[in-house]
Image: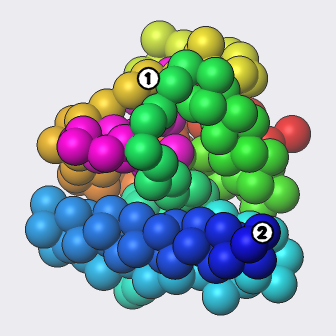
Amino acid sequence: MNHKRRIDSREKGAKGELEFSRLILEHLNVKLVRNLEQTRGGGHDLVATGDDPVQATLNLFAFECKRYAAITPALLSKFWQQAESQARSVAKIPALAYRGDRQAWRVLVPLNSISEAFPETWEGYEWTAELSMEAFAALVRERAALPMAGWEIIRAAAESTNP
């Protein structure tokens, strides 16, 4: 019985990743694919293919996708710890994409990845911003439109999150 539950959980996780990937394609015209390293090394779930500015911006994030029946603040805190840990291991910005049953997808990112007003790195769920898919796509588009020098802001956020 426990083996079946693990398979169901993995299948639901893979379906959630595919669902989130489709939304990224819809909003940003970028295809995200499963990170082949995640199985071997416990890394983040998705990566963008290609290297145009939007794809490059998406690849600054280490995506962790969660699809659960009910999402609680306690679960979000636990998921965020996992996202931070995985992002730290690859020197990227953590991004937690999640959806509960009959809910819209949401994306958690560190505050310092959305505004220079938060230059410090504060770890933990309480220092995140929760974005709708539309808001996350807008963040990516705006960051991708910055001149290369402006990209240093979001890159610095990744480095400061990952000492």
Q: Name the residue under label 2.
A: 2
Distance of mark 1 from mark 2, alpha carbons?
A: 35 Å
Q: Give the range drawn in magenta.
A: 96-114
Pick whichever, 51 or 135, lies toward us: 135
> Which residue lies at the image location 67% right of the left edge and 77% below the top edge?
4
Which amino acid does the dot numbered 1 rest on? Ala
Q: Where is residue 42 in the image (x, y as percent from the top left)?
A: 80, 69
Position of 103 with respect to 65 (left or right) is left
Q: Name the residue under label 1.
A: 129
Pick whichever, 80 or 32, lies toward us: 80
Q: In which quarter of the image is the N terminus?
A: bottom right
User: Dots 1 and 2: beta carbons under 8 Å?
Assistant: no
Pick whichever, 159 or 41, lies toward us: 41
Q: Position of residue 59 (x, y in %)?
A: 50, 66
Position of 15 with respect to 154 (left or right) is left
Q: In which quarter of the image is residue 139?
A: top left
> Which residue lies at the image location 33% right of the left edge and 63% below the top edge?
20
What is the crowding at mark 2: few (fewer than 14 residues within 10 Å), some, or many (at least 20)?
A: few
Q: Where is residue 140 in the image (x, y as percent from the top left)?
A: 30, 50
Residue 126 in magenta? no
In this rendering, the answer to whether 55 lies above or below 134 is below
Q: In which quarter of the image is the C terminus?
A: top right
Label whose residue precedes the other's in the sequence (1 or 2): 2
